Image: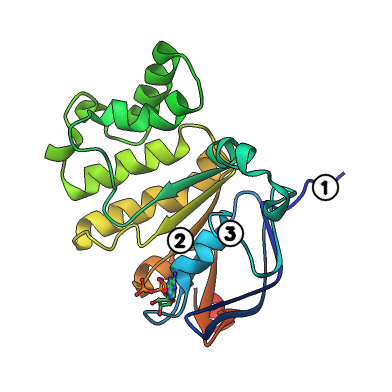
Amino acid sequence: MTSSPTLDVTGLSCELGGRALLRDVTLTARAGESLAVTGPSGSGKSTLLALLAGLRPAPAGTVRVCGTDTAALRPAKAAAWRLRTIGFVYQAGELLPELSAVENAALPLLIGGTRRTEAYETAGRLLDELGVGAVADSPAGVLSGGERQRVAVARALSTRPPLILADEPTGALDERATDDVCELLYALPARYGTTVLTVTHNPLVAHRADRRLRLHAGRLTEDRAAEADA
Ligand SMILES: Nc1ncnc2c1ncn2[C@@H]1O[C@H](COP(=O)(O)OP(=O)(O)OP(=O)(O)O)[C@@H](O)[C@H]1O
């Protein structure tokens, strides 16, 4: 028996502010794949992520994550489902600055009802695995950009979701930290079996994903030229 794809999107269309942002988008991603979506500013990349996560209802088409149709989720259950199923990484970490790294990384577990000791143990272990164990007790506000993103990745991974969505995860980093975080993100599929979908403006970040997609004029197309190039 084959398991459901992590992401299965068919006929997804979305209009915002009188403009067709997505037109009949189809996308399938399997467990353990990394994908990068590039596209001009304002083309709808962040909107696509919100639709994939079920944070915005799909006006037309279907979004299934690990077999669950996001439109069929009852609002009361959606948040708990999202916590288990999708991890998010944003541009500048978006950590709570006054909490320590380990407290930030443990947040999704605590919100999901995991006991404190277990949540902190799991978060601490992940920080070690991701190379930021040494700053576990430091307030997030004093961390470097690269450290913050590693902690953000630990937080996204803490509930062991099958899917991680990253929106410009290296957008606030210098070249060296970009390289570091890029390596870490794209190692997640092999290390944890997670599917990683990254939205990025940086062609070097996109180039390192297993699959590259381009969003332009509402169409999401696989970039085969870059594939042949790789
Ligand atoms: N709630 C909304 N109502 C109307 N227009 C919106 C709304 N949300 C986003 N938009 C518009 O939709 C377009 C796509 O926005 P989105 O943030 O998805 O693009 P993006 O490709 O992620 O851009 P960037 O690369 O600059 O971050 C933009 O023109 C934005 O102004």
In the rendered image, which residue does mark 1 sit on?
A: 2
The residue lying at 35 percent from left, 32 percent from top is 105
Q: Say whether mark 2 is within 8 Å of ligand 1.
A: no
The residue lying at 22 percent from left, 29 percent from top is 99
The residue lying at 17 percent from left, 31 percent from top is 139
The kind of residue tagged 1 is Thr
Where is residue 200 drawn, in percent x and y? 39, 68
Quarter location, residue 81 = top right
Indicate whether 172 appears above or below 67. Answer: below
Cα–Cα span, label 3 and label 1: 22 Å
Question: Can you see residue 48?
Answer: yes
The disc, 3 or 1, on the residue closer to the chain's N-terminal end is 1
The kind of residue tagged 2 is Thr
Front disc: 2 or 3 = 3
Q: Nearer the viewer, residue 12 or 126?
A: 12
The disc, 2 or 1, on the residue closer to the chain's N-terminal end is 1
In the rendered image, which residue does mark 3 sit on?
A: 52
In the rendered image, which residue does mark 2 sit on?
A: 198
Q: Quadrant of ligand 1?
A: bottom left
Where is residue 9 drawn, in percent x and y? 69, 64
Question: Can you see residue 220?
Answer: no
The disc, 2 or 3, on the residue closer to the chain's N-terminal end is 3
Where is residue 59 drawn, in percent x and y? 65, 69
- Horizontal side of residue 16 vs 3, given as left or right: left
- Horizontal side of residue 186 vs 194, given as left or right: left
Front disc: 3 or 1 = 3
Q: Callout 1: helix, strand or loop?
A: loop
